[in-house]
Amino acid sequence: MVIPEVLQNMNEWCVEHHNASGLTDRVRASSVSIEEADRRLHQFVAKYVKPKTAPMLPPKRLKHRGLEDIQDTLEEFKFYKRHFLHTAASLVEFPSAVPYC
């Protein structure tokens, strides 16, 4: 079950790449409801992530002071780069972050 507004509100990058990969057409053709997809996702994640944990987040000091926040952000970036962006050079060479599709 596709919510048309979601597809209509995709940014240019998402439209281009998801159309090219066929994902948009597969989503439109899917008979899986949002609720069922949500249930499946939670079931999948539960296999790998312990409850009340955030495995993709590095430890943070959370002092919320200017310089320390900047230092924490830089450390967080280093964490992501070390753990998630090292698998292919193309992953770190994107021209702009496209966090939402």
Image (cartoon, helix red, strand yellow):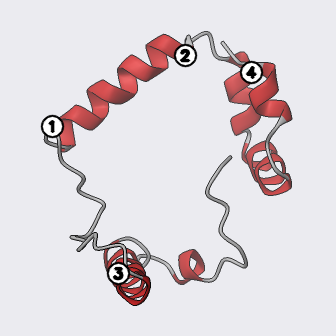
Q: Mark 3 points at which residue?
A: 72
How crowded is the residue under tag 2: few (<14 C-alpha within 10 Å), some, or many (20+)?
A: few
Asked if the residue under mark 4 is in contact with the one under mark 1, i.e. CB atoms within 8 Å, the reply is no
CA gap, disc 2 and disc 3: 36 Å
Residue 81's x, y, as percent? 40, 80
Asked if the residue under mark 3 is in contact with the one under mark 4, i.e. CB atoms within 8 Å, the reply is no
Q: Nearer the viewer, mark 4 or mark 3?
A: 3
Secondary structure of the residue carrying numbered label 3: helix
The amino acid marked with disc number 2 is Ile
Q: Mark 1 points at which residue?
A: 51
Q: Mark 2 points at which residue?
A: 34
Asked if the residue under mark 4 is in contact with the one under mark 2, i.e. CB atoms within 8 Å, the reply is no
Residue at screen point 32% across, 78% down: 79
Q: Which of marks 1 and 2 is nearer the N terminus?
A: 2
Task: Using the rendered image of the protein, determine whether residue 86 is visible from the camera's viewpoint.
Answer: no
In the image shown, does 67 or 35 lie closer to the viewer? 67
Secondary structure of the residue carrying numbered label 4: helix
